[in-house]
Image: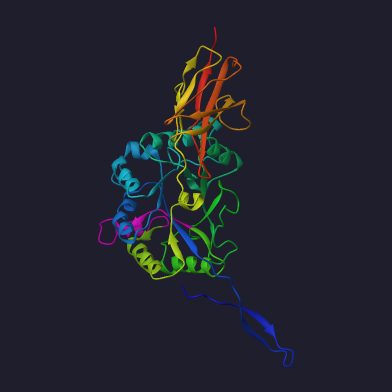
Amino acid sequence: MVALATATAVTTATTGATALQPAAVAEGPVAVSLVFDDGLTSQYRLAPMFRDHGVRATFYLNSGALDARGGAGTMSWEWVRELATAGHEIGGHTVDHVAIAGKGLTFRKKWRQVCDDRARLIAQGFHVNTFAYAEGALDDRAKAIVRGCGYQSARKAGSLWPGGPYRAEPVPPRFGAYEIQVLGVRHNGPMSLDSLQAAVTAAYTHGGGWLPILFHRVCHPGTDTYDKCMNSYRPVDATVVKKFLSWADSQSGITFRTVSEVLNGGVLTPRVRVTRPAAGATVKVGRPRLAGTAQGSGAVRVRIYKGAYSVGKPLRILGTKAVRGRWKAMPGKPLRNGRYTVQVSQSSDGVTGTSVPVTIRIRRG
């Protein structure tokens, strides 16, 4: 990649004239993550292009839209499975594409939007660790919900820009794993090839780093809906995406990686689940038999929370071991009557996988 030099004003001692002199700027490699929101059919149609360029992307999906699939605008579960099989990453985006920040929804409804979405995606067979805030709306409570539902990371809808102050993310992310910045656009108009190239070049010439780039609608020339698509919210012409990938191929110092590949160094997190008791079950003993699945063998940590949510400090933490992909545990001291939430995690090769939480009710006697 050709470096772009900045300039600083320098005043000469003899003449007092001011001249522009090049300033040294550190360069560095850029890992680009192509991230797509909403699970649109137009995004799925990019799959052959990604295959030809050896690129894997991250797709953030609304499980409710995929279940309903009322029209041709949303992917089918079959198409999502094709993407996952090809190495693309699947992430969560709430069940119904609703904002989970602010006062619009109760805490319970926000929780269900995030946790039920992840549970549905996992039930379809996907390895789901990353989340995107619908409408880009987040606050401290939203971050706590996403973390409580077992997600490893969460992404905003903007904040990176070629002109700074933030041109790329470091790893770990600047504001934490649940507030990942991304390159969006600052206007409601089509994304251009020049803007994409400028964003990568700016990151490269300012030390490098991680550049997630957010896309929504992809407009395909020659289709009946092309003109309408290009007049929609923040679209991109499929030809622009193709030219951008070809340009990146011709440059040094640019790689394409999924979100979790960047955060985990290419290591997959263990898949863990709570399978017993079932979610919503009523247990008539104070020491319920807890069980689930894990990745191979090794240590597993089981956390029990008082109430219906896995947030805050756990009431109990149980240590156990997985044997051939299965774990079992039981509280040492009986639990009182009431609702409890169980969540399990497993660490391997420096990364940790966390299950979707399961809430049960204890009713003794």
- On the question of residue 102 being in view, the answer is no
- Colour scheme of the rendered structure: rainbow
- Number of numbered discs on residues: 0
171 relative to 123 in the view: left or right? right
Depth check: give the residue in front, 136 or 224. Answer: 136
- On the question of residue 49 being in view, the answer is yes
Residue located farthest toward the right when viewing the structure as drawn = 13
Depth check: give the residue in front, 22 or 334. Answer: 334
Image location of residue 132, percent across then percent down: 48, 46
Image location of residue 67, percent across then percent down: 34, 36
Residue 225 among those drawn in magenta: yes
**Location of residue 107 (image quadrant):** top right
For the point 63% across and 31% down, the residue is 313
For the point 61% across and 76% down, the residue is 24
Residue located farthest toward the top when viewing the structure as drawn = 365
For the point 71% across and 88% down, the residue is 12
Image location of residue 53, percent across then percent down: 33, 61
Give above or below for 163 relative to 216: below
Give above or below for 84 relative to 220: above
Magenta segment: 212-234
Give above or below for 224 relative to 289: below
Quadrant in which the C terminus appears: top right
Depth check: give the residue in front, 25 or 77. Answer: 25
Image location of residue 264, percent across then percent down: 50, 49
Residue 104 among those drawn in magenta: no
